[in-house]
Image: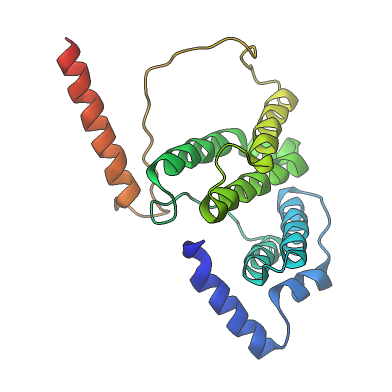
Amino acid sequence: MRHYYLIVSMVCACSLLAGCSALDRLRDRAPQPGNFNASLASEYYAYAEMRAEQKDAGDAEFFAYRGLMATDGKPVPPLRPTPEELDPAALATMQQAYIRLLETVTPEAKEVVPELAARTQILYECWYEDISQKGIVTGSACKEAFYQSLDEIDNALGRPTLPENDEVILPPSYVILFDRDSAELDTTAFHIIDEIRLAAEACGACE
């Protein structure tokens, strides 16, 4: 993934100076599930180890670094879809998944089912990897597990869910996400604004 290449480079450089990798340091801490951050660190640890076994050192270091941040009690938000990494169809798919993740893994979910909430974020990022690196959109095992975890969170919190075979057609909705403490529009936001304009023009033509 392009968006973390710089981070990985910085982590690797620091690892050379420190004499050990981010994954080595995370192994020393051996994070265990607990509250949301502890569970997130544990999930990143397991995922980083898996990537290391697959000989993907860059990804292993990147996710180990995120695990270290979680063990330090720092917020580790889910990876945000970007048009620089994804084609338009994949971008739209991952934006919907990203929004669903944020809507489901709420502070309440992190408090009540911290391990499941952490697992759901990792599954989302695993699916993101499948799409951005391997081009796997529909056949990803992480995708299927991700949506199953979302449903499990909703069930655990007693949230209403739709019957499996019922289809509800809703009008299109659009969400523009801003970086923290920023009012600037990025490329994704301008794409969404274009979609809104086209939808409005289409509605006008139907009147």
Residue at x 71%, y 53% (from the top left corner):
40
Residue at x 70%, y 74% (from the top left corner):
22
Residue 4 higher or lower than 195, as above or below: below
Is 49 positioned to the left or the right of 102 in the image?
right
Is 37 positioned to the left or the right of 195 in the image?
right
Toward the viewer: 144 or 189?
144
Residue at x 76%, y 51% (from the top left corner):
39
Toward the viewer: 66 or 158?
66
Residue 11 in percent (x, y) is at 60, 77
Quarter of the image where one finds residue 44 = bottom right
Is 177 positioned to the left or the right of 94 in the image?
left
Quarter of the image that includes the C terminus = top left
Residue 78 higher or lower than 166, as above or below: below
Residue 167 higher or lower than 141, as above or below: above
Quarter of the image where one finds residue 116 = top right
Residue 158 in percent (x, y) is at 70, 20
Residue at x 64%, y 50% (from the top left corner):
126
Residue 127 in percent (x, y) is at 61, 46
Is 58 positioned to the left or the right of 32 in the image?
left
Is residue 78 in view from this perspective? no
Toward the viewer: 139 or 114?
139
Is residue 162 in view from this perspective? yes
